Image: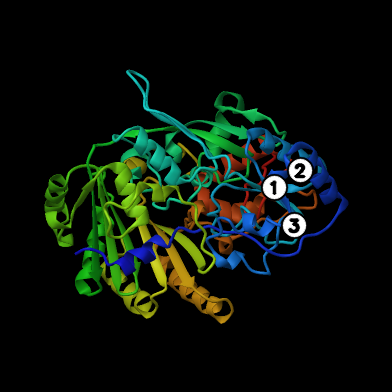
């Protein structure tokens, strides 16, 4: 059954972002910082709070109205860097005058930490949206296909450039075209093809980072440990990654997409229970079935690297309960599939150029949380989730990304900082929407917290795992010690949920490359320093 426009449009709304607004603190350090910037960076790239374009630049990629209110702390200024030298100057001026930077590539930090501060402090936003070049090398003979991508580019811009270069090249990214490449890769980057090719960060070949001294380092210069840390260790903890070299993968000329919607009944719970274990089978890496549950509907979004006839054969053999038929299939190229999935619920011929648009959304308030499932919830569990939570509120959603395949059985947990691999069935993103501030926020938080609490015995534990790209300040925030540096113990509270056994190595790298903790936010990696 084809998905209705209403249902899929709500699925696609889950392309969040964030941004800022409230009084800043005037100080001599701030004045000296602004003077330093004005001497080094062209005036048209620098926006202070008194600039006429300040608010439009600040909100240019906001996707969450929670962080566009008068209670949000505004930055002292925004640097819209158009050259790596501007990034270096911003870091050096900030270090010299004690003003920290919040770095924004696409603005999709779920807690807005790429452009706002939870506490009142003087800070600046370094906006990388002007650093958005994508340079594709299709590869010849023994050379593998690759692309150098600036951190300010969006996934949509990356997909478009790759698709225009070759119909048989692809990159395993996510399902939201306005997400910034820098943030996506810094958090590990899960997506529809990770079962075949690994996470986005698994496919990083090289990178260029501006460190706390303002120097530009590539993979060879930064060393193995720092290169490991930036590929999934969370954005902004170690420096400003300005560009990434990505491995591109070969895909068939034809891929197949099927969107199936099921209204809830007892058979839907049984199908979900079958999906939990079928979707992660290691011997079907070419097939991904994403499940989105909202209200009384479940959408199964199937993506297959191959033809419709091959897909139907596999579904008949291994998952007949979903009832996939050839008439449900949409065959297309990989890049067109990305446009179809990210932009449209029904139009196979949606213009590819739609993936190049950068849009914001100041009308929707959103709260997110996340989990990982290692043991199937089962039919009875899904019946209770529907009956006690989802059926009571249509503005509550669960988005589930299957693991398994290459990401779950071939690549070790320590290959990059993203540790949720071996034994993980799928990731859950919980989403609550509301459309007015005030009492609606309290109700929405009650809905999502109620569902999150209900799920506790059904998901991973010790620690209860979470995904850093679905950032959630409810699981912990940093504390700054008397020495002006984030304490290791406060970071460990939330850090082991995101990174598990990889957290300590991340903190050790932080202690080596930024012991003074210049690159800091409420959930940045703390520097570990041996006694």
Alpha carbons under labels 1 and 2: distance apart: 7 Å
| Residue denoted by label 3 | 49
Q: Alpha-carbon neighbours of circle 1 within 10 Å: few (<14), some, or many (≥20)?
A: many
Dividing the image into 4 quarters, which one contains the C terminus?
Answer: top right
Q: Helix, strand or loop at disc 3?
A: loop
Kindly check if marks 1 and 2 are in contact, taking CB atoms under 8 A apart as contact: yes
Q: Is residue 306 above or below residue 330?
A: above
| Residue denoted by label 2 | 94
Quick check: can you spot residue 458? no
The mark that comes first in sequence, 3 or 1, is: 3
Nearer mark to the viewer, of 3 and 1: 3
Quarter of image, res 131: top right
Q: Helix, strand or loop at disc 1?
A: strand
- Residue 12 x %, y %: 39, 60
Alpha carbons under labels 3 and 1: distance apart: 16 Å
| Residue denoted by label 1 | 101
What count of labels does the image hold? 3
Dividing the image into 4 quarters, which one contains the N terminus?
Answer: bottom left
Q: Helix, strand or loop at disc 2?
A: helix
Q: Which of 497 and 151 is in front in this view?
A: 151
Q: Which of 339 and 468 is in front in this view?
A: 339
Residue at left offset 88%, top offset 51%: 28
Q: Alpha-carbon neighbours of circle 2 within 10 Å: few (<14), some, or many (≥20)?
A: many
């Amino acid at each position: 059954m084809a998905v209705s426009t209403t249902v899929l449009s709500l699925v696609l709304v889950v392309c969040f972002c964030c941004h800022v607004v409230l009084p800043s603190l005037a100080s001599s350090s701030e004045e000296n910082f602004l003077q330093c910037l004005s001497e080094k960076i062209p005036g048209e790239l620098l926006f202070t709070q008194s600039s006429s374009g300040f608010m439009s630049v600040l909100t240019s990629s906001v996707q969450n109205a929670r962080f566009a209110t008068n209670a949000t702390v505004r930055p002292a200024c925004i640097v819209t860097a158009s050259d790596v030298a501007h990034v270096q100057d911003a870091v050096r001026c900030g270090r010299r005058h004690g003003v920290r930077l919040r770095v924004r590539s696409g603005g999709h930090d779920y807690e807005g930490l790429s452009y706002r501060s939870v506490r009142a402090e003087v800070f600046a936003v370094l906006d990388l949206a002007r650093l958005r070049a994508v340079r594709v090398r299709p590869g010849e003979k023994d050379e593998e296909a690759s692309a150098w991508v600036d951190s300010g580019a969006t996934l949509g811009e990356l997909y478009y450039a790759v698709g225009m270069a070759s119909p048989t090249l692809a990159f395993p990214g996510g399902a939201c075209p306005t997400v910034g490449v820098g943030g996506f890769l810094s958090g590990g980057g899960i997506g529809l093809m990770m079962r075949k090719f690994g996470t986005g960060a698994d496919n990083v070949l090289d990178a260029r980072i501006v460190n706390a001294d303002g120097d530009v380092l590539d993979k060879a210069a930064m060393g193995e440990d720092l290169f490991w840390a930036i590929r999934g260790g969370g954005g902004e903890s170690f420096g400003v990654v300005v560009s990434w070299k990505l491995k591109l993968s070969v895909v068939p000329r034809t891929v197949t997409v099927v969107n199936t919607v099921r209204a809830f009944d007892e058979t839907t719970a049984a199908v979900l229970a079958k999906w939990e274990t079928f979707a992660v089978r290691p011997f079907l890496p070419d097939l991904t079935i994403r499940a989105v549950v909202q209200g009384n509907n479940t959408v199964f979004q199937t993506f297959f690297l191959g033809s419709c006839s091959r897909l139907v054969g596999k579904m008949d053999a291994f998952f007949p309960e979903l009832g996939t038929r050839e008439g449900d299939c949409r065959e297309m190229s990989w890049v067109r599939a990305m446009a179809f999935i990210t932009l449209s619920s029904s139009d196979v011929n949606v213009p590819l150029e739609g993936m190049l648009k950068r849009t914001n959304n100041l009308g929707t308030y959103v709260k997110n949380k996340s989990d990982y499932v290692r043991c199937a919830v089962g039919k009875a569990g899904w019946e209770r989730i529907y009956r006690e939570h989802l059926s009571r509120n249509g503005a509550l959603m669960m988005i589930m990304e299957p693991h398994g395949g290459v990401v779950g059985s071939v690549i070790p947990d320590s290959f990059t900082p993203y540790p949720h691999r071996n034994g993980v069935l799928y990731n859950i993103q919980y989403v609550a929407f509301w459309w007015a501030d005030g009492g609606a926020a309290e109700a929405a938080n009650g809905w999502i917290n109620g569902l999150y609490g209900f799920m506790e015995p059904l998901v991973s534990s010790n620690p209860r795992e979470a995904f850093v790209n679905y950032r959630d300040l409810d699981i912990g925030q940093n504390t700054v010690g008397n020495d002006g540096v984030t304490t290791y113990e406060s970071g460990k509270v939330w850090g082991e949920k995101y990174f598990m056994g990889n957290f300590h190595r991340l903190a050790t790298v932080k202690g080596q490359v930024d012991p003074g903790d210049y690159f800091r936010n409420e959930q940045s990696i703390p520097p570990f320093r041996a006694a």
